[in-house]
Amino acid sequence: MATTVKIILGVVFLGFVCLQVALFLVNEIKLPKLNIRKLTEKKGKIKILAIDPHPDDETMLSGGFIANFSRNKKVELKHICVTKGEKGDEILKISETELAKIREKEYEKAIKVLGCENFEIWDFHDGKVEVESKEITKKLHTELNKFQPDIILTYERAGLYGHPDHVALTKIIHDLVEEKHPNVKVLYKTLTKRVLKSIKLPFHMANGREVVQALPTMRLPILRFIPLKYKACRRHKSQNLGQGKPLWLLMVLFTNEYFTDKY
C-alpha cells in the first residue's frame, strides 16, 4: 500500500515538473506585460475595437484579451467579425449558406461567453476580403468615426499563417489608420518564435506567398480567463480549433497571449 502511494505521488510530481517545463518553454515570460494605459497615454476610459475576419479568430489568440478587457470598467470593448466564415468547412460538409448561419450563431455564443456584449458580424464574403477591400475600408472608416477607438486589435501582418483574408484585413486597418486615423494605436496579435516553430499551422492557405510573422513585443497573462477561453472555443463546434491537438491541453499550456504594436 505504501509503495503504491509512493508511486502515485512520484507520477504526480513528475507530471507537475513536466508541466512546469512545458509552461516555461511555450510562455515567453521575459516579455513586458501589456499596458494599454501606457500604450495610449490616456487617463480616461479607453475604447478598444477588436476586428477579426472570421468567427473563431476572436477566441484562439485573443480570447483572454477580450475576456479581460470586457470586464474592465475603465475600458469599453467592441468586437467586429467581418465575414461569417462560410468557407470554413473543416468538419461539417454542408452548403456555404447553411454553414454561414451556423458559424454566425457559434460566434455570438462564443463572444458572449468571453463577456463582450457589444459586437457585430458583417456580411462580407469569406475568402474575398482583399477583393472587397474598398467596401470594407469604407465601412470601417465609418465605424471608426462612430466608435472612436483608442486601440484597434487585429492579426499581425502575415495573418499568422498567411491566410489571405487575415493579411488583407490587417493591411486595410494599417492603411486606414495611417491615412485617416493617426491617433489610433493598432495592436497586432501574434505568437512567439518558439511557439510558431512548434505548432502546426495551415501554411498552405498562404497560396505560396512568403510568410514572415511580426513577433511579439509584449504579453498579457490570461491564466484566470483560461476556463472562459476554453468554453468559448467549445462554442465553435463546426471548426477544428485544436488542429489535431487536445484543445484543453493548448489552453493549459498557453497562459499568455502575445502582441506587438509594430506592423
Image: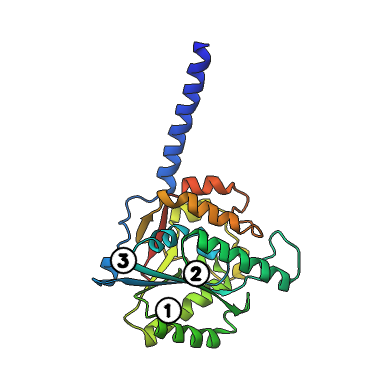
Which mark lies nearer to you, 2 or 3? 3
- The answer to whether any part of residue 87 appears in the image is no
Image position, residue 164 (x, y; %): 57, 73
Image position, residue 121 (x, y; %): 56, 74
Q: Which residue is disc 2 drawn over?
A: 158
Query: Residue 193, relative to residue 84: is it above or below?
Result: above
Mark 2 is surrounded, within 10 Å at the Cα level, by few (under 14), some (14 to 19) or many (20 or more) other residues, namely many
Mark 3 is surrounded, within 10 Å at the Cα level, by few (under 14), some (14 to 19) or many (20 or more) other residues, namely few
Which mark lies nearer to you, 1 or 3? 3
Q: CA distance from mark 1 to mark 3?
A: 26 Å
Q: Nearer the viewer, residue 252 or 193?
A: 252
Query: Residue 34, relative to residue 98: is it above or below?
Result: above
In this rendering, would 124 be left or right of 176?
right
Q: Amino acid at mark 1?
A: His
Q: CA distance from mark 2 to mark 3?
A: 31 Å
Q: Which residue is disc 3 drawn over?
A: 74
Quadrant of the rendered image containing residue 22:
top left
